[in-house]
Image (tube, rainbow, N blue to C red):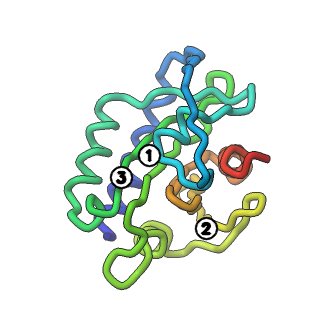
Amino acid sequence: MRKAAVSTILVLCICTNSCAGTTVERQTTLTTIVSTDEPYLISASQLLETMVWPPHLQPITLSPTAERQLQRFIFDDVEIAAAVSDVAAIGLVRGAKPIGAILVIGVTDPVIGNMSFIEGLRAAALNTSVDTTWGPMAGSVMAADGQVWGVLPLSSVAVVAVGANRADLDEIMNALVRRFTHQ
């Protein structure tokens, strides 16, 4: 689990750093949303596809290299792969400045071994984290190497995000919480 979490951090760092040289084009994606009796169940890809970011934040596609590294991370760890339904990741920019990246993990089995998926991710990736809230949702945050990291469980998905600073991380997480809670 620790190796998998470190790999996640590496992928997000690479993604954040590779955003700096990326040309930003606004992308419009039309998506059909199917309403169910259980609105709290959403896949990682559905969350990002249906996400409406604040106008000043633009999502950008990650490089193919970063996506391949991410896939290797997920499917090299048997326990993680068995608990993951899907994975989606994007970078975010404000103007031409990269402010962070997010990795959304769809979780099919919330328990791995004797701990929850989120507890394992938190223990491995954010060992010096503190609890925090974004809107009505609780997560964890920590600062390392000039970046701020956050983990936020959203029912059927877990969000791992990195921001240039706490304000950027809060903006990213609050936008996700608003989308998820329909606020």
Residue positioned 62% across, 35% down in the render: 51
Q: Position of residue 59 (x, y in %)?
A: 57, 29
Q: Residues within 10 Å of mark 2 (few under 14, many from 20)?
A: many
Q: Which mark is residue 140?
A: 2
Query: Is 180 left, or right, of 27 in this rendering?
Result: right
Q: Which mark is residue 85?
A: 3
Mark 3: secondary structure: strand
Residue at horizontal 60%, vertical 47%?
A: 163
- Mark 3, Cα crowd under 10 Å, few <14 / some 14-19 / many 20+, is some
User: Above or below — where is 80 with respect to 65?
Assistant: below
**Callouts 2 and 1 close, C-beta under 8 Å:** no
Query: Secondary structure under badge 2?
Result: strand
Residue drawn at the location 43% of the way across and 68% of the way down: 121
Quarter of the figure with residue 3: bottom left
Residue annotated with mark 1: 13
> Is label 1 in a helix, a strand or a loop?
helix
In three-dimensional space, the C-alpha distance between marks 2 and 3, rounded to whole angstroms, equals 22 Å
> 100 or 105, which lies in front?
105
Which residue is at the front of the view, 42 or 61?
A: 42
145 versus 92 height, above or below: below
Q: Amino acid at mark 1?
A: Cys
Q: Return the residue found at the far bottom.
A: 114
User: Is 11 on the left or on the right of 172, as rendered?
Assistant: left
